[in-house]
Image: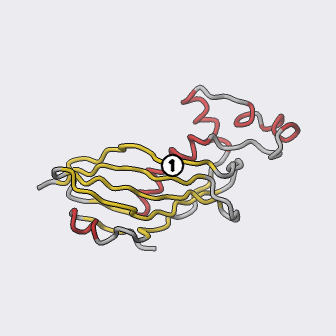
Amino acid sequence: MEKVVINSYEDFEKWVGKQIGVSEYVPIPQERINLFADATLDHQWIHVDVERAKVESPFKSTIVHGYLTLSMLPYLWGQIIEVNNLKMMINYGMEKMKFGQAVLSGQSIRLVAYLQSLANLRGVAKAEIKFAIEIEGEKKKALEGVAVFLYYFNN
């Protein structure tokens, strides 16, 4: 799917209630999981101990940190949309976020995103993006929720 290009608030308005796009699948290898564990100081064995996970984990594999899955959102979002003419964009919050299924080491994920709502707050666009992070080959979603971004367009 071709990247959606937004140059103004009016361009954004046309997408309210519609699917904006679907990203490419991105693999999450053990190396990325280990780097995330180092960055967050979360070295729980279910994420980083491959041999123990094979034996003791119900998944028989290490699993991706839930917050690593969430942290992939900006990268995946950037594959779907290009917003131009900005002073800045701020991650404003997350709503109704739910982890549905663990992502196993080596699996690939992608983003499916809809523009749920858009509001003009004194010249700042507040975009609520309903999203799902899907796991390749799985029916159940890894993560679902609403991401809220503030877009400060140049006048």
Horizontal side of 140 relative to 84 (left or right) equals right
Horizontal side of 51 relative to 46 (left or right) equals right
Question: Which of the 4 quarters of the picture holds residue 128?
Answer: bottom left
Q: Position of residue 119 (x, y in %)?
A: 27, 57
Image quadrant containing the C terminus: bottom left
Q: Amino acid at mark 1?
A: Lys
- The image's colour scheme reads secondary structure
Report the label total. Answer: 1
| Helix, strand or loop under label 1 | strand
* Residue sitting nearer the eye, 25 or 114: 114
Q: Position of residue 118 (x, y in %)?
A: 30, 60
Q: Position of residue 29 (x, y in %)?
A: 66, 47
Question: Which of the 4 quarters of the picture holds residue 83?
Answer: bottom left
Task: Name the residue at 29% across, 53% down.
Answer: 126
Q: Position of residue 16 (x, y in %)?
A: 34, 68
Task: Name the residue at 31% across, 67% down.
Answer: 5
* Residue sitting nearer the eye, 120 or 34: 120
Name the residue that disc number 1 marks. 96
Task: Name the residue at 62% across, 48% down.
Answer: 99
Q: Residues within 10 Å of mark 1 (few under 14, many from 20)?
A: few
